[in-house]
Image (cartoon, helix red, strand yellow):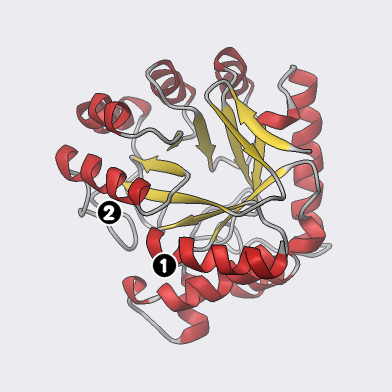
């Protein structure tokens, strides 16, 4: 048996698909900016997603969409703080926080979070110290050194680059003394990639996934789906998201990160019956 686990959570791998519900407390996220940046609304939405079957609540205080405002660590903490105590009090599933700042990771892990969702695309010794200190989960994302605005050229192809990055990160975290069971990899759909690269990754998840390491796939409402189905409005990409998630589940991804929890939970259960 393989697990993704830390002090406050444990997910057995290979038995089902876990659903991570997105809680953006930002004014400028690409598809739901401004909807949940009020503390009461944020906590209510988190509870709603939990009740709909989310296994993890993933909180983002800074948007990563193209052209979004870059916040400091202090700014992120100031956005998180007004709703944090109520969130921890009312949510019983593990809480993840999107950040690449060690200071933010320290704040949330000290106060009840279990997982850090890090989109930096690199190994940070300062972040690793915090992860190790709290025995937390660490989602490590590939971005090829780019952002949501960039399209990196991958000399040997994007699938090869992602696999090499995951191998290098496995070595780095192990050398630092962090258990591989604490690490979850994310292929980084939409970060440093063209639509062609994104589709190549989705169709090749089975080649990227390794049996004893957790893999998260974050496809929900993303531009690659909008371009594929001809839908400019991100909120109208649910069916395309479900189709892409089902392909990822067929490739044995362990976690899907979604905005629409209830329909994606139902779709994942059906896909699990077929593929697992």
> What's the residue at 74%, 53% (across, down)?
162
Residue 274 is situated, as x and y percent measured from the top left of the image, at: 68, 70
In this image, 22 relative to 229: left or right?
left
- For label 2, the residue is 28
Identify the element where label 2 is drawn: loop
**In the image shown, does 181 or 117 lie closer to the viewer?**
181
Quarter of the image where one finds residue 108: top left
Identify the element where label 1 is drawn: helix
Local crowd at mark 1 within 10 Å, few (<14), some, or many (≥20)? some
- For label 1, the residue is 263
> What's the residue at 36%, 46% (across, down)?
50
> What's the residue at 66%, 29% (across, down)?
182
Quarter of the image where one finds residue 207: bottom right
Question: What quarter of the picture does the N terminus occupy?
Answer: top right
Outermost residue toward the bottom in this view: 230
Outermost residue toward the front in this view: 273
User: Relative to 69, is 132 above or below?
Assistant: above
Residue 100 is situated, as x and y percent measured from the top left of the image, at: 49, 34
Q: From the viewer's perspective, is the residue at label 2 or at label 1 nearer?
A: 1
User: Relative to 181, is 43 above or below?
Assistant: below
- Asked if one can make out residue 260 in the rendered structure from this viewpoint, the answer is no
User: Relative to 34, is 83 above or below?
Assistant: above
Q: Which mark is residue 94?
A: none
Of the numbered discs 2 and 1, the one sitting upstream in the chain is 2
């Amino acid at each position: 048996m393989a697990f993704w686990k830390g002090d406050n959570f444990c997910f057995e791998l290979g038995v089902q698909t876990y659903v991570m519900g997105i809680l953006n407390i930002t004014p400028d996220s690409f598809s739901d900016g401004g909807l949940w940046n009020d503390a009461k609304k944020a906590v209510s939405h988190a509870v709603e997603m939990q009740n709909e079957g989310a296994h993890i609540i993933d909180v983002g205080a800074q948007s990563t969409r193209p052209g979004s405002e870059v916040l400091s660590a202090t700014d992120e903490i100031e956005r998180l703080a007004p709703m944090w105590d109520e969130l921890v009090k009312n949510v019983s599933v593990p809480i993840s926080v999107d950040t690449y700042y060690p200071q933010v990771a320290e704040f949330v892990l000290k106060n009840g979070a279990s997982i850090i969702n890090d989109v930096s695309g690199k190994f940070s010794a300062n972040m690793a110290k915090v992860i190790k200190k709290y025995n937390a989960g660490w989602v490590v994302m590939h971005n090829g050194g780019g952002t949501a605005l960039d399209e990196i050229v991958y000399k040997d192809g994007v699938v090869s680059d992602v696999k090499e990055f995951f191998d290098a990160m496995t070595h780095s975290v192990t050398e630092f003394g962090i258990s591989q069971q604490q690490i979850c990899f994310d292929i980084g759909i939409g970060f440093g990639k063209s639509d062609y690269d994104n589709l190549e990754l989705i169709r090749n998840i089975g080649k990227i996934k390794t049996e004893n390491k957790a893999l998260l796939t974050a496809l929900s409402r993303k531009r690659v789906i909008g371009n594929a189905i001809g839908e400019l409005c991100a909120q109208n990409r649910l069916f395309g998201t479900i189709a892409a998630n089902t392909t990822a589940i067929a490739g044995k991804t362990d976690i899907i990160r979604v905005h629409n929890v209830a329909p994606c939970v139902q779709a994942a259960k059906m896909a699990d019956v077929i593929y697992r």
